[in-house]
Image (cartoon, rainbow, N blue to C red):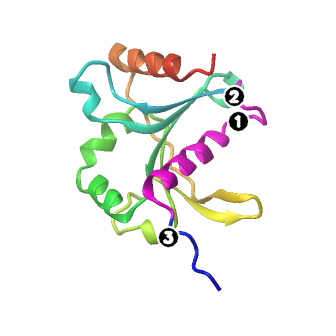
Amino acid sequence: MSRPRRVEDAERTATMLDLVRSLYSDGNAVSRSHVVIEEVSPGTGWSAAQRYADVLALSVWPSKGQILDGYEVKASRADLKRELAEPTKHEALARYCDTWSLVAWDESVLVDGIPEHWGLFLTAEGQHGRELIQKRKPARRTPEPWPRTFVCSLVRNAFEQSPG
């Protein structure tokens, strides 16, 4: 029997980003109810580019609540430890979100100290490849008002990442 192939962190991260995006796909390649944006900073310019949310998903239909879900994607235990050691890093973006969740490759990535109010998603091998499993629902946050710098960052990234 052969050993399972080692999946490198970059491949893990790409897979997890695709899985988070698929949460909002509405059965189509591009969601009509959500704008899903990767690597969003709290503003534009050099100083703002030091902090990023891995994924933000903004519901744009009133029936979906018009909320902003934030995701921190972690492929390795060491990366998660670094993230938790510096809470200002994720809070730079989480403060604008209605929910905040951690997406980790599997249980082996998890460490002590993950905030209780964060949602938790893990990936697992499923019938048709890797799938995302919600282990803990995120608590609803009270987001801060969005400053113009954050809106500019959202719009710029959405434009740069748009399929058209």
Residue 3 in the image: x percent, y percent? Answer: 57, 79
Decide which of tag 3 and tag 1 comes sooner along the chain: 1
CB contact under 8 Å: marks 1 and 2: yes
Residue 68 in the image: x percent, y percent? Answer: 52, 32
Q: Mark 3 — residue?
A: 107
CB contact under 8 Å: marks 2 and 3: no
| Quarter of the view holding residue 89 | top left
Q: Nearer the viewer, residue 102 or 63?
A: 102
Outermost residue toward the bottom in this view? 1
Q: Which residues are magenta?
A: 7-32
Q: Nearer the viewer, residue 17 or 149?
A: 17
Q: How many marks?
A: 3
Residue 63 visible in the snapshot: yes
- Mark 3, other Cα within 10 Å: few <14 / some 14–19 / many ≥20: few
- Mark 2, other Cα within 10 Å: few <14 / some 14–19 / many ≥20: some
Outermost residue toward the front in this view? 2
The residue type indicated by label 1 comes to Ser
Q: Quadrant of the C terminus?
A: top right
The residue type indicated by label 2 comes to Val
The answer to whether residue 63 is magenta is no
Asked whether, in this view, residue 59 is left or right of residue 157, the answer is: right
Q: Residue at x 52, y 47 (%)?
A: 14
Residue 24 in the image: x percent, y percent? Answer: 66, 37
CB contact under 8 Å: marks 3 and 1: no
**In the image, which disc is placed on residue 30?**
2
The residue type indicated by label 3 comes to Glu
Helix, strand or loop for disc 1 = loop
How far separated are the C-alphas under marks 2 and 3? Answer: 30 Å
Q: Is residue 39 above or below residue 10?
A: above
**In the image, which disc is placed on residue 25?**
1
Helix, strand or loop for disc 3 = helix
Outermost residue toward the left in this view? 47
